[in-house]
Image (cartoon, rainbow, N blue to C red):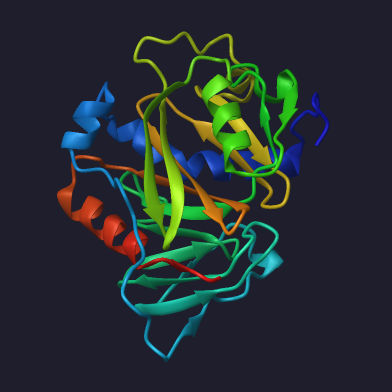
Amino acid sequence: MSTNQSVGTTSMRRLALAVGLLVAAGLSGCADDADTAEAAGRPTSPSAGTSASSALLSIPEWNGQDEGAQVPLGSGTYAVPSSPWSVAGFRVTFPAGWTVQYGHVYAQHSDQPDEFGFYAVVVDEIFTDACRGEGGTTQAVGPGVDALITALLDQKGGALKTNVTDTIFGGYPATRIDLRIPKHADLDRCQMAEYGFAGLQVWYSEPADKYFVLLPGAVATVYVVDVEGERQVFLTQVGNPHSQTDLAELQTVLESIEIEE
């Protein structure tokens, strides 16, 4: 993607859909600091789940004609193959009510204020300044987990990075980073304001064709996973961080993830 590429009609639609994955958290509001968010019970350290059933289900193939349609998933354990946005395949178990969008964005309460979910994504560059976003420049991110972690922690533009911790995700070592926007940040000068949104553009993933837009009031969690030397990223969000039921369900789903060797 060009460092100064503008958002056209198609890209703007995808941008809006990407924002939709996070907008619920912005509408519901969340804790103003990481400690309060922790107390609310947001997901902390996903680890390898129990062995998946031998009767694995397949994620419905995305039909381009459906564009952003939310496709219902039946409850069960699914085999997710490697793809342009996932360096390794993984297994994940969903309870009833989950949907998939674009073949790889998984959510519960889709398109509702209390939406929560996750997706895997390949990130090879981030915006140098999250406020300027694509109106500024991009920074290439080299291989390995440390390069992305360093780039995120050094990124300018006003996003606060908190709760940087080592953890296990899908059976592999990972680093967790929470990102949020300060409560009284002035976002009118940022790139997203030109599109009618208040938020920060953290990255654009060309393989996944996804923007990561952080919105006011939202706390997004990035898991940077070391899969045998390969870098894999998982991004999660919770629309209502005060709902213990939603938090527990997402945690259970994340803990069920088993990344293939």
Residue at the extreme front of the image, as rendered: 228
Q: Quarter holding the N terminus?
A: top right
Left or right of 15 in this view: 176? left
Q: Quadrant of residue 104?
A: bottom right
Q: Quadrant of residue 189?
A: top right
Q: Where is residue 246 drawn, in percent x and y?
A: 24, 53
Q: Where is residue 30 drawn, in percent x and y?
A: 27, 30
Of the pair 113 and 139, the residue shown nearer to us: 139
Of the pair 51 and 82, the residue shown nearer to us: 51
Compared with 157, 251 (above or below) is below
Residue at the extreme right of the image, as rendered: 2
Of the pair 222 and 184, the residue shown nearer to us: 222
* Visible residue check, residue 197: no
Q: Residue at x 58, y 37 (%)?
A: 146
* Visible residue check, residue 10: yes
Q: Residue at x 80, y 24 (%)?
A: 4
Left or right of 238 in this view: 208? right
Q: Where is residue 144 drawn, in percent x and y?
A: 64, 44
Q: Quadrant of residue 123?
A: top right
Compared with 134, 59 (above or below) is below
Q: Quarter holding the C terminus?
A: bottom right
Of the pair 203 and 108, the residue shown nearer to us: 203
Q: Residue at x 59, y 57 (%)?
A: 68
Q: Residue at x 31, y 49 (%)?
A: 45
Q: Where is residue 6 drawn, in percent x and y?
A: 78, 28
**Count the marks: how many?**
0
Left or right of 226 in this view: 84? right
